[in-house]
Image (cartoon, rainbow, N blue to C red):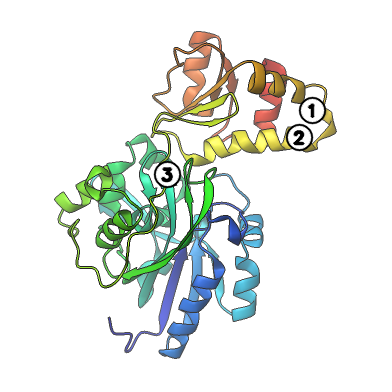
Amino acid sequence: MSLSGRRSAVLKPNIVIGASPRSGIVTHPAVVEAVVRLLRGAGVTEISIADGPGVGLDPVAVFDRSGYSALAERLGVRLVNLNTAERRDRAWKYGTLAVPALVEDADLYVNIPKLKTHGYTTLTLSMKNHKGLLSEADKKRDHQLGLHDPLAQHAKLVPPHLIVLDGIVGVEGDGPLNGRTVKTGFLAVGTNMLEVDAAVARLAGFDPRAILHLRIAESEGLGTLDPRVIGGAPVRRLKPANEQYGRRMNIYSWRDCTACSMCIDSFAAGVRLAARDPRYWLTLVPKLAYWGVLGRLHVVQGRDAKPPAARGRVVCLGQCTRALAEREGLVHVPGCPPTGRDVAEALRKGL
């Protein structure tokens, strides 16, 4: 791919939450820095780093914690919160999609995803990272539409010119936010999202044909699941996420693709808040200890959530589950997504 004549570039890493660069949850700033320096050496002068952090999060805190505020200041590049960026409506299968003008207008769009397993999509790679261009409302709609087909459909709009996938350190197990950090030791570079994702899936021990949004993308003519690969030996197979639930001790988070990962992350935020806030040490922490060790707590989320048949207490998380909670008389945590405080207060009162 030639960079001749290109003067502006938008780099889109995965900065979904405010996680440490070493966590494997966010694209490491060192990878983005290398791309910035490469582009500058080729004459690209107007460079922006852009992402829309997870729904409901403070973007300043996310960019600070993940190392991107410091990186942008040191390199002298713009750092853009796409959640508040100017947008243009573009037609797609499900009506209109609001696309960032910054990305459309750039001479070069570089997608810089992170290698992680995912409870809904098996892996989160470049096509899933591309979803980060969307507005918060469109991100929520993607989940309501079942996630897989929307991922394939909006890959047709403003596809990247280049993909540089950070697979140096990844996440396995209960990804994308609560899995285990693993050393995988590679970068993947290409110009087609589907083909990069298919190649990386194989490197990580997964059959790309078993990943629904990749199959849909191939059927839509976006590339092949059998691309030509230059170099690259398989790494150790990443442990996949449990397709039914995530689990910490006896607290189960039941999966539903109509719910977003920010929803269950809010539950974890509520637990962390209870551990550090003295107001909850006697009113909530003992309850969480009981249900997590001696009992069983089931957290359900998403529009299609159902109470599991297993014994235990059920907590309905997020606005999508309000009707279920009212109908079944279950503990409900409001919000889309809830805040950590919402979670802590609802659990304190309801458990």
Q: Nearer the viewer, residue 268 or 151?
A: 268
Query: Where does the C terminus fall, quadrant-wise?
Result: top right
Residue 199, given in percent of the width and then of the height, sits at: 28, 60
Secondary structure state at the residue bearing disc 2: helix
Kindly report which numbered mark, 1 or 3, lies closer to the viewer in this rendering.
3
Q: Tell me, yes or no, whether the two marked residues, 1 and 2, touch with CB atoms within 8 Å.
A: yes
Answer few, some or many: residues within 10 Å of disc 1's Cα (few below 14, many 20 plus, some between 14 and 19): some
Query: Would residue 322 appear left or right of 198 to someone viewing this image?
Result: right
Instruction: Indicate whether 271 appears above or below 219.
Output: above
**Can residue 94 be spotted in the picture?**
no
Residue 239 disc label: 3
Q: Quadrant of residue 98?
A: bottom left
Secondary structure state at the residue bearing disc 1: helix
Residue 169, given in percent of the width and then of the height, sits at: 50, 60
Q: Of label 2 and label 3, which has the lower sequence position?
A: 3
The residue under label 1 is 280
Instruction: Indicate whether 251 appears above or below 185.
Output: above
Instruction: Indicate whether 337 appears above or below 106.
Output: above
The residue under label 2 is 275
Q: What amino acid type is highlighted by mark number 2?
A: Ala
As measured in the structure, the alpha-carbon distance from the residue carrying label 2 to the one carrying label 3 is 29 Å
The residue sitting at 64% across, 78% down in the picture is 74
The residue sitting at 63% across, 65% down in the picture is 67
Q: What amino acid type is highlighted by mark number 3?
A: Lys
Instruction: Indicate whether 190 appears above or below 276.
Output: below
